[in-house]
Image (cartoon, rainbow, N blue to C red):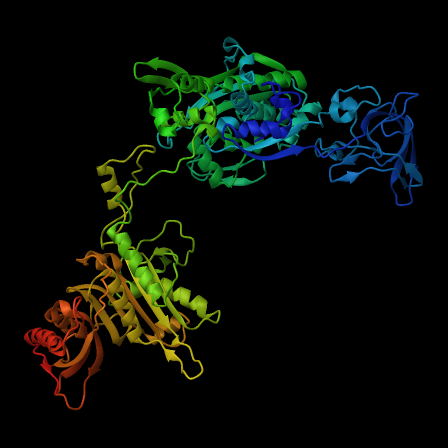
Amino acid sequence: MRVPLSWLREYVDVPADATAEDVLAALVSVGFEEEDVHRFELQGPIVVGEVLEFVEEPQSNGKTIRWCQVQVAPEGETAADGGPAVHGIVCGARNFFVGDKVVVTLPGSVLPGPFPIAARKTYGHISDGMIASAKELGLGNEHSGILRLVELGIDAPVGTDAISLLGLDDVAIDINVTPDRGYALSVRGVAREYSHATGAEFRDPAARYASDELAPGSGFPITVDDEHPIRGRVGASEFVVRVVRDVDPTKPTPPWMIARLGLAGIRSLGILIDITNYVMLELGNPIHGYDLDKLQGGITVRRAREGEKLETLDGQLRTLNPEDLLITDDSGPIGLAGVMGGGTTEMSDATRNVLIEAAIFDTVSIARTARRHKLPSEASRRFERGVDPAIPFVAARRVADLMVEYAGGTLDTEYGGALFAEIERTTIDLPAGFVSGLIGVDYTAEQIAHALRLIGCDVTTTSDGWTVVPPTWRPDLTDKWTLAEEVARIEGYDQIPSVLPLPPSGRGLTPAQQGRRRVANALAAAGFVETPSFPFTTEEQNDLHGSASGEHVPSIRLANPLDGQAAFLRRSLVPGLLQVAHRNVSRGFTDLALFETGTVFLPEPGVEYGTSFIPPLAVRPDAATLAELDASIPPQPRHVAVLLTGNLVAKQPGQPAVPAELADALDAVRTIAAAAGVSVVVEQGERAALHPGRTGVVSVDGTEVGYVGELLPAVAEASDLPGRVIVAELNLDLVLSLSGRRVVAASLSGFPAATQDVSLVVGADVPAAEVRDALVEGSGELLESLRLVDDYRGQGLPDGKKSLTFALRFRAPDRTLTASEASEAKLAGVAVAAERFGASLRE
């Protein structure tokens, strides 16, 4: 919001010597963010001159120039640039006459651009300055001729400083207004806030009209017919119209008004539109003016009908949505309510009678319409943040009075209309001690009550605190928390101590969080690189990787996907890893060991997810509400997945390249299991995307938790990945839930270990992991580690048998083990394996 200081000073006492930076500092102290300072890029001397005479001189290029004699200082005095009182100036414009008062930029002055002015030879003359147009001065876009002061109603003495005369010495501050403080999108609101910050006297511009003078006449029909209100809120709660007759739209806008509008970021568009924009900036209520003679019948505020169209003031023909709130007359739509008017009833140079509209529209309706049509406007910016419901009568009357004063019109007190609802003001209970407890500052009762009254609240003291009624211009004050924030803001944020909160003892990461971190750290330590990816994929990829057999499975489709080709939430992490691998391979990184942990989305067949129920804001939902929300989303377990391709060890002197194999993915699965504190079993299995002979199903205690295997060559080729690609994916949440123990670091023993090997012959269909578990169970506490080192099947063994060789390490914490103690522990493990699987020692 840009606010010219001259305008701000009308409603609050800003010291004469206060700079724009001083005003910004004061507003920052009450919670606003400064953006910039805006000035007219002009430097003098720029003065009022009088055209004494001119000679028209045709040129060889077909152009006719005027060689002018312009008086720029009283007779006998020196001009502001130190030159004579009469300057010779070449001018190409032809819209002025002898005796006209004009604006002369003398040598040494600078116009916006920057464009320095100097005496220079042109068209055979020394032009000692320039006669300026309105555009050259920054007073508008009119560049067809020079600025004649008589057209602005100005008759100033020759030599007068034109910069201050035209208000071009003003400066504007620019602050960022957050969406909850829409009242500050007005000079009225900013002046009030400056008063809060400095204690300066505030003069409310809305107070200039007494309430008994505000009610307009009757006779103009107004109807609000909202058959489909959004969230039960009628589109228009107030609609005030006034009529001004016999205006002259060709009258010039006063220079001070043009200057203020320009500094505020709005260009001048003619006196009638300038006045409506001026009042909008002053009071914060957007105003729209209609050419009364173009209206057909009365005004009806309603929702759009299917197929209706409207040409807005920007010349665009827009197809309307049934949610759009419209201003209509008997001819149909004539404006998008609160956003932009229509072209059929716009004010023009032919307008003689004006209908002024000041209304209050529903914030949600306006916000949706502005975004739907990509049509943000100064009006919608204010309506979607909330406009003071007590201001439309004042705003309409203010516009009418300015049109009477500057456009020569007459206010029709007998013809007008108004529809309005009673203004609802919520009463808030503020307990004693709440503000201090929340903010952390010991405010006195007097400080709290004073701060709330200062911002316009009605405050009543009760036995246990206060009852507070916020002012009409503060719809953001809805509860005791927002009131506490206001007290902190008014009393000063610098009063709040900087104290770091202390976490309560005994808390930290949950067991599940600790488990996920252990798994991620273990994979990173094993040489894998974590690559988070977007959770979006295609339905085909979900079917291929999200099910064992590749059949169609339900997937969650996004209502508004970032990429229309990947409109579904993933059921597996593998598609994301394949995309990352493809991106790296295409950039020359062919040796990859990747992993990702993240959520997958597994909707149940036949279950519809989603809800139209929206819980109220600023209210903690109860258990039933949370349960309903939880039921509206699909199961979202966390998975962990790894991908290997290329070489695990790069080629180097004396060392050939070692390609990644299925065994390396199995090692990654064991790494995950060890970090999670479980023991896994891998058995032969099948999955649609994996090689049928190189696929394993991973289980923990008989529960399937994932898979590991090599991608089918066709699947790898479809992802533009050369060579072999090995993947593994586990349900990490399920794995951690099956962990029956905490993972702790074992104490280190200072005694030597005793190592022994054992080869057991078992059936070929017996999983090695189960044999390993039997050896661990039987060997007892002396067993420190056990590792499978060989799986032999072939000559010397009966058909259907295999030989598993394990390396065992034994250690005691308090002594050196003897060979017999180690052998005894080993044979105890063999006995358990023999009992369970018929295992025998290989001879």
User: Hey, which quadrant is residue 313 in on the image?
Assistant: top right
The residue lying at 83 percent from left, 28 percent from top is 96
Residue 812, compared with residue 474, is above or below; it is below
Quadrant of res 567: bottom left
Q: Residue at x 35, y 65 (%)?
A: 525
State the image coordinates of residue 731 (x, y, percent, origin top left): 25, 60
The tally of labels here is 0
> Residue 196 at what x, y percent from top left?
51, 21
Q: Is residue 494 left or right of residue 750?
A: right
x then y, percent, for residue 155:
79, 19
The one nearer the camera, 454 or 550, is 454
At x 49% / y 26%, what residue is drawn?
183
Is residue 144 rendered to the left or right of residue 261?
right
Question: Outermost residue, top direction?
Answer: 212
Q: Quadrant location of the N terminus?
A: top right
The residue closer to the viewer here, 716 or 596, is 596
Corner quadrant of residue 504:
top left
Residue 326 seen from this side = yes
Task: Give the percent coordinates (x, y) of residue 131.
Answer: 83, 32
Q: Residue furthest left?
A: 835
- In which quadrant of the rendered image does the C terminus lie? bottom left
Q: Is residue 590 left or right of residue 605?
A: right
Would you say 58 lies left or right of 617 here?
Answer: right
Residue 335 visible to an observer of this rendering = no
